[in-house]
Image (cartoon, coloured by chain):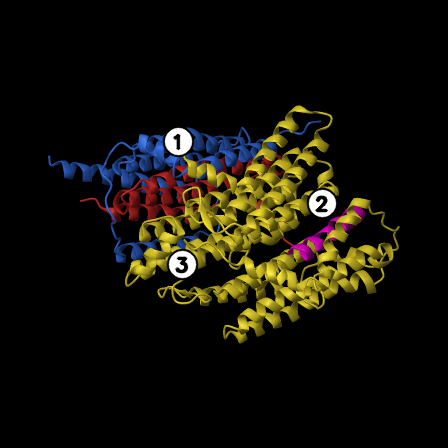
Amino acid sequence: MNPEILQDLESFVPEIVLTLALLLVVLADISLPKLRTRVTFLVTAVGLLAALCFTVPLFGAGEKALFYNMVALDRMAVFFKGFLILASFLVLLAAPGSKELSSTHLGEFYALLLGVTLGMLLLASSVDMLMLYLSLEMVSLTSYIMVGYLRHDRQSNEASLKYILFGAVSTGSMLYGITLLFGLTGSTKMPAIREALASGGASGGNGMALLVATALILAGFGFKTAAVPFHFWCPDVYTGAPTPVTAFLSVAPKAAGFATLIRFFFSGMSDTTTSASQWSAFSAMNWTSLLILISIITMTLGNIAALRQDNLKRLLAYSSIAHAGYMMMGAAVLSYEGVQAVLIYLITYLFMNLGAFLVVIEIFNQTNSFNVNDYRGLYRRSPFLAISMTIFLLSLMGIPPFAGFFGKLFVFAAAVNHNLAWFAVIGALNSVVAVYYYARVIKAMIIEGGDEGAGFKLAGTSRALVWIMLLPTVGMVLFWDRIQALTGRSWKFFIG
Amino acid sequence: MDPTTVAQVIFYFFAVLTVASAAIVVFSSSLIYSAFALLFTFFGVAALYVFLGADFLAATQLVIYVGGILILLLFGVMLTHKLYDLDLKTETFQFFPGFLVMAAVLLTLTGVISKTQWVSRGERPLNPTTIAIGLLFMREYILPFEVASVFLLVALIGAAMIVRRRRS
Amino acid sequence: MIGLNHYLFVSAALFSLGVMGVLTRKNAVNVLMGIELILNSANINLVAFSRYSVASLDGQIFAVFVIIIAAAEAAVALAIVLSMYRIVKSVNLDQADTLKG
C-alpha cells in the first residue's frame, strides 16, 4: 500500500463514513423486515451527522490535493462539504413527514440520499476533469432516480424521464468539451490545464477550439445549476418530483454545481499570476462577459416566468432559477470577493428555500394542493405556517433584516466593487420584479379569505423543522460577523 | 500491396461503417433497424480503438457496449411495444430545425478541428495496454476506481427499485 | 497517412448525428441511442488524443470510465422508460406532457 494513499484517507473520513452508512442502509433494508423503516432512517441520520462531525476538523488543514491530485482538500471544499451534508440532513428530516412519500418504502430513498451526498462532496472538491465528470454523473443519476421515486405516479415518471434525457445530453456534450480541452492541453488535471493555457496553448487558431470546448463544458454546469439556456428541465422536474426531492434539488446539487463551476473557471481557466485577489481570464475567451450574460438572462427569465405561475412548486422552481442567476453574479466577477458573496448567498438560500418548501409540504399534507388559490386564508387555519411562509418569502425577496437581504447585498456589492455597477442595478431591478410573485402568495395567505376549513394539526416534528429553518432566516442578522468571517476564510482554494 | 495503403483502406472502411451506421440509427423510421445499426456503430468504434492501439478498450467496448448496453436497448425496444405491433415505426418531430442544428454543429466542429494545431506532447508507442491500465487503476486512478464501484451500486439499487412491481 | 484529424472528424460526425437524434426523435429509446452516439464520439476523441497528443494512457483510462458511466446511465434510463411505459402505455415524448403548467 502506498503510504501517501493511507495519509490521504485520514482527510477523507466524511466520504468514508457516508459510504459505510450507505452500505449499512442497504444491508439493513434487506435483512430486517419489521424494524427497517426506523433502522434505515437512524443509520442515515447518524451517518450524515457523523460525516458532518468529521468534516469540521478538516477546516484547519492546509491546502493539498489528495489521491494523486484527484480531489482537493482546502477550506472551500470543507465549507461545501459541511453545507451539503447539512442540506441532506435537513431534507432527511423532512422526508418521512411528507404525505407524498408516506405511501412508499423509504429504504432505498435513504440509500440514494447518502449516495447523492457522497457524489456532491466529491463534485465540490474535484480538481481533475475525470473526477469531475464521474462525480457529476453520480449526483445526476441518483437525482434522476429520486425524482422518479413515486413510480406509480404519472407526473413523477414524466419528470424523471425528462430529467434523465435532458441531463444525459447535457453531460454528454460536456464530456465532448472535456475531451477537446484534453486534446488542447494534454492533461485532465485543472492545474496542468491552466499552465498549458497560460503558456499559449490556446493562442491563435486554437482559440476557437478553446471557445467551443468551454461552451460545451458550460452546458454541463448550466444544466446542474439550472442556468439559462439549460434550465428547461427545471420547472417540469421540480413540479413532478416528490416535494422533499424538489426541495433538495433546489439547494444541494445546485450548490455543488456552483462549487465546481468556481473551481473550474478559477483554477482551471484563469490566470492566477497577475494579482492575488483578482483573476483575469485567458485572453482567447472572455469568460466574464459570458458569465455576466448568462447571469442576467437567467435571473430575468426566472423572475418573469414565475410571475404567471399558480402552482407553488413551479413558482418556486422559477424562483430558484432566478436565484441561481443572482449567485452567478458573484461567480462572474472572477475574484475572491465574488466567491465569498456566492458562499454567503448559499448559506442564506439554504434556509429560506428549504423553509419555503417545508411549508409547501405541510400545506400539501393538509390540503392536497399546491395551487396558490388554495393558500387563501391560510392565516386563519394555521397562523404559524402562514407567518413562517411569509418570513421565508420576504427573505427570498431580499427584504432586510432577513437572511436573504445579506446574500443579495454581498453579491451586488461584489459587482459594484468591480466596476460593474450596471450589473448590480439589473440585479436590483430583478429583485423588484420578484417582489410581485412572492407578495401574491403572502397576500393570498394573509389577506384574502378562503374556505373556512378546520385548523391544521401540525405534527411536533414538522413544527420543529420549520423552526429550524426560521431561526437562521430571522436570526442571521445577529450572527452576521461570524458568517462573514467564516466565508471570508473559506474562499481559499487549492491552486496547485 | 503497401502496408500503409492497406491500413488506410481498412481505416476508411471502418470509419465509413461507423458513420453510416450512426446515420441509419438517427434517420431510420424503423426502431429495429436503428437498434441493429447501432450494433454496427459500436463495432466500428471498437475497430477504431484497435487502430489506435487501445486493445483493452476495444475488448471492453465490445463486451459492455455490444454485449450489455445494446441488449438493454433491444429489451427496451421490445418491452415498450405491444406484442402485435410488429411495425415499430417511430416518428420524428421538428426534423428540419433539428437537421439545421446538426449541420451547424458539424460545420463548427470540423472547422475548429481543421484550424487547430493539435500540439503533440509525445506519441505513445503501440504496446499492449492491459497491464499498464491495470496498474494505473491501482495507483493514480484508485479514487475514481473506488468511487465508480459505489456509483454502480447506487445505480443498481435505484434502477432495480424503479422497475420493481407493486408489492400488493 | 492516417492522422489525428481523421479520428476527430469521425467523432465530430458521430457527435452531430447524436445531437440530431436527440433533437428529432420522439421515441425515448431512440433518444437514448442518440445519447450513446454522443458518448461514443467523446470516447473516440479521448483515445485518439491519448495516442497522438500525450505520451500516456490517461485518455484511455478516462474512456474506460466513460463506458462504465454510460452503462449505468443506460440501465437507469431504461428502467425509467419501462416504468413510464407501464403507466402511460407509450414512450413517445409527446405523450409526456401532463406537467406543462
The answer to whether residue A361 is seen in the rendering is yes
Residue A272 lies in the magenta stretch:
no
Q: Are marks 3 and 2 on the same chain?
A: yes
- Place residue A397 in its image quadrant: bottom right
From the rendered image, report the letter of the chain displayed in yellow: A
Q: Residues within 10 Å of mark 1 (few under 14, many from 20)?
A: some
Between the C-alphas of marks 3 and 2, the distance is 39 Å
Between the C-alphas of marks 1 and 3, the distance is 37 Å
Q: Give the range drawn in magenta.
A: A350-367
Chain letter for the residue marked with disc 1 in the picture: B
Q: Is residue A356 above or below residue A35?
A: below
Camera-side residue: A40 or B74? A40
Spot occupied by residue A166 in the image (x, y as percentages of width and height): 51, 48
Residue identified by numbered label 3: A269
The answer to whether residue A242 is seen in the rendering is no
Three-letter residue code for mark 3 = Met
Q: Residue B66 carries which label?
A: 1
Between the C-alphas of marks 1 and 2, the distance is 43 Å
Q: Chain C is drawn in which colour?
A: red
Residue identified by numbered label 2: A94
Please tell me whether mark 1 or mark 3 is closer to you in this view: 3
Q: Is residue B143 above or below residue A363?
A: above
Quadrant housing the C terminus of chain B: top right
Residue appearing at x 64%, y 49% in the figure: A87
Camera-side residue: A139 or A293? A139
Three-letter residue code for mark 1 = Val
Q: Is the magenta stretch mostly helix, strand or loop?
A: helix
- Asked which secondary structure carries label 2, the reply is helix
